[in-house]
Image: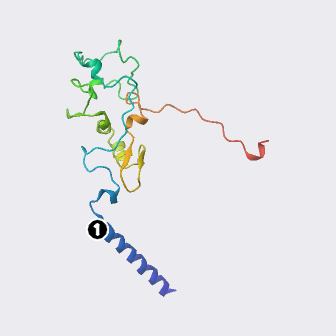
Amino acid sequence: MKNRSTHIVILFAMAVVLVLVAVAGHAGRREFWLTPPKSETEDFMVPPPPFTEGIFPCSECHADMTPDPRRRELTEEHTDIELKNHAEHERWCLDCHDRRNRDKLRLVSGERIEFTQSYRLCGQCHGDKYRDWRMGIHGKRTGKWNGRKEYLLCAHCHNPHNPRFKPIPPKAPPERAENIQ
């Protein structure tokens, strides 16, 4: 029995060594580690943002408008947009949308980004969710297990102006097999 235990320990140790050698040989290769892009500015593969029909590019309507940065109730356009459950008393449109170029989003640093990089904007406040999204724990991604993946943007699942999921009414429990006629 002792001889068999020794063989198991030796085989386990050899397996560990082989894994360590494989890892060392692939160190730094992204396809081995299955990690997202290496930097904050390297793009993820994402589908187009889920814009409402006819709303983008924003510059079609906003190009000749003088931006009004005052927090106020919108009465002419975008009246269907309500900031709810998203710091509505502290936020305003221009906290996220760029004041001068409405076809861009604006980070806290002032950097303008494309809507396809909106995950960077959301990640400024929701760092834990952003970290989890990058690693594939939060949100949805599709693709090859050992290759490039396509990540859904935050806005594919969450309304950026009212991000909390609506309550889902509970369903009745399933019928027991013996009660089904």
Q: At x 28% / y 63%, what residue is drawn?
A: 27
Disc 1 marks a residue whose amino acid type is Gly
In the picture, the quarter occupied by the C terminus is top right
- In percent of width and height, residue 69 lies at 24, 19
Drawn side of residue 143 relative to residue 21, left or right: right
Q: At x 42% / y 79%, what residue is drawn?
A: 11
> Height in image: 94 above or below 65?
below
Q: At x 31% / y 36%, what residue is drawn?
A: 116
Which residue is tagged 1? 25
Q: Is residue 48 visible?
A: yes
Label 1 Cα neighbours within 10 Å, binned few <14 / some 14-19 / many ≥20: few
- In percent of width and height, residue 142 lies at 42, 47
Secondary structure of the residue carrying tag 1 is helix
Q: Quadrant of residue 79?
A: top left
- In percent of width and height, residue 33 lies at 33, 58
> Height in image: 129 above or below 101?
below
Q: At x 31% / y 16%, what residue is drawn?
A: 72
Q: Quadrant of residue 20?
A: bottom left
